[in-house]
Image (cartoon, rainbow, N blue to C red):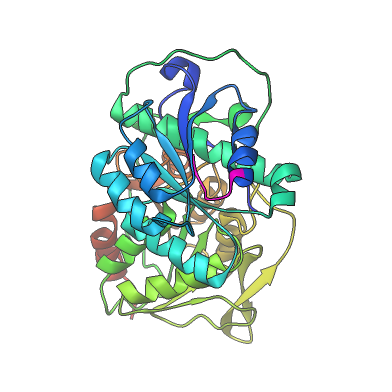
């Protein structure tokens, strides 16, 4: 399971007015208790409500200053997919994190939930793993804090009273960064830039961004496209299927040995880094399980680095919303080689971690709202040599 560093858009819980206020929704009292114990081990998070079905969750919105909801999918009375739009109708500012087991059916439902407005998802381990799995604990805490920081920065929620502190170190609290749009310095696009490949990196909020981007991309877009989205196995296959539904281009989960074809979208499979290599005159996908980078596998940086060796200066890379800094170092190598980097702006990012780190490093030619990215890429692709 990938663990991403948390970006910081709105300050810590302490500076933002007390612990992040969470509601846990799951039909299992045991699971609710274990999740509550897990996230309350961090001093900056407080579970203010715990309920057993979607109807009770909907009825609870507006009480206790709930900011983030951990929402199960399969529940009696009202399931998570039904409850989600009702929750967001009452309070659109609430961040909903879908918790589901790693099955094809639940991965598909989770993807539909993201399309309906869920902010994030997390694979739910077994009860035994819940009580002992540090990876799940770290990832859940990081996601809650990242969404809490971003949400408070954008919605300016009123302060609440802090609880008694209980010291614990997490990836999020020890490595969070704050980036400002005022720190961004753009660089011009090379006059003779003619991209031959489009490479995209994304994490938290990435599926929603990818759906919108590919839905607006020119149906005749004629470059190969490689995508690394921080996701576990099973979910990446479903992500590719959902991308195919919003675009006339073909999307698939990458397999080792795939030859890159124009107008095809290749999604890195969960738990594997995706790299590109030259082989017998073709550009070919390779997969490996080298150690995680930036706490992630798949990670964006290995993919970006590999492209430089094959495509040189003819690379256009995009860094979408996500926690941490993954992609920023690889994007720098692309730009150093003569390629072009574009980052999503803070206002339209769910978490301005990855794109923020890329933007403030001074390597981007543009930092754009999500709605502007596809039109801009369409225009740049026209410069491709025949």
Of residues 351 and 127, the one nearer the viewer is 127
* Residue stretch rendered in magenta on the structure: 24-29
Judge from the rendering whether residue 7 lies leftward or rightward of residue 87; answer left or right: right
Residue 272: x and y in percent read 66, 65
Judge from the rendering whether residue 128 lies leftward or rightward of residue 147; answer left or right: right
Q: Residue furthest front?
A: 77
Quarter assignment of residue 67: top left
Residue at 40% x, 26% y: name it.
Answer: 10
Residue 109: x and y in percent read 44, 65
Q: Quadrant of the N terminus?
A: bottom right
Q: Is 139 placed above or below 257 here?
A: above
Report whether residue 300 is seen.
Answer: yes
Q: Is 285 placed above or below 368 here?
A: below
Report whether residue 8 is seen.
Answer: no
Residue 34: x and y in percent read 65, 40
Residue 26 is one of the magenta-drawn residues: yes
Residue 207: x and y in percent read 42, 59
Of residues 26 and 158, the one nearer the viewer is 26
Judge from the rendering whether residue 81 lies leftward or rightward of residue 268; answer left or right: left
Residue at 35% x, 48% y: name it.
Answer: 365
């Amino acid at each position: 399971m990938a663990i991403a560093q948390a970006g910081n858009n709105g300050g810590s819980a302490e500076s933002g007015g007390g612990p992040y206020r969470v509601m846990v929704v799951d039909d299992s009292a045991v699971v609710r208790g274990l999740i509550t114990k897990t996230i309350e081990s961090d001093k900056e998070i407080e579970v203010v409500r715990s309920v057993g079905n979607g109807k009770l969750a909907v009825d609870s919105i507006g009480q206790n200053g709930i900011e983030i909801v951990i929402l199960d999918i399969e529940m009696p009375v009202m399931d998570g997919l039904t409850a989600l739009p009702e929750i967001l109708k009452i309070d659109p500012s609430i961040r909903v994190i879908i918790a589901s087991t790693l099955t094809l059916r639940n991965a598909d439902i989770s993807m539909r939930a993201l399309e309906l407005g869920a902010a994030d998802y997390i694979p739910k381990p077994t009860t035994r793993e819940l009580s002992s799995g540090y990876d799940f604990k770290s990832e859940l805490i990081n996601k809650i804090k990242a969404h809490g920081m971003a949400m408070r920065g954008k919605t300016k929620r009123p302060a609440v009273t802090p609880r008694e502190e209980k010291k614990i170190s997490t990836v999020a609290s020890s490595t969070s960064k704050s980036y400002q749009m005022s720190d961004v310095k753009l660089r011009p696009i090379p006059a003779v830039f003619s991209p031959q490949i489009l490479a995209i990196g994304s994490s938290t909020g990435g599926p929603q961004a990818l759906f919108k981007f590919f839905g607006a991309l020119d149906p005749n877009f004629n470059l190969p496209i490689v995508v690394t989205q921080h996701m576990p196995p099973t979910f990446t296959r479903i992500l590719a299927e959902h991308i195919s539904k919003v675009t006339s281009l073909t999307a698939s989960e990458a397999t080792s040995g795939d030859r890159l074809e124009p107008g095809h979208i290749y999604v890195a499979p969960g738990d594997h880094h995706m790299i590109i290599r030259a082989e017998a005159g073709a550009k070919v996908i390779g997969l490996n399980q080298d150690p995680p980078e930036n706490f992630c596998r798949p990670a964006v940086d290995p993919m970006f680095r590999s492209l430089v060796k094959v495509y040189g200066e003819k690379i256009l890379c995009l860094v979408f919303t996500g926690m941490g800094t993954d992609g920023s170092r690889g994007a720098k190598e692309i730009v150093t080689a003569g390629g072009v980097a574009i980052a999503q702006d803070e206002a339209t990012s769910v978490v301005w971690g990855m794109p923020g780190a890329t933007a403030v490093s001074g390597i981007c030619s543009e930092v754009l709202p999500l709605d502007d990215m596809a039109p801009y890429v369409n225009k740049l692709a026209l410069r491709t040599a025949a």
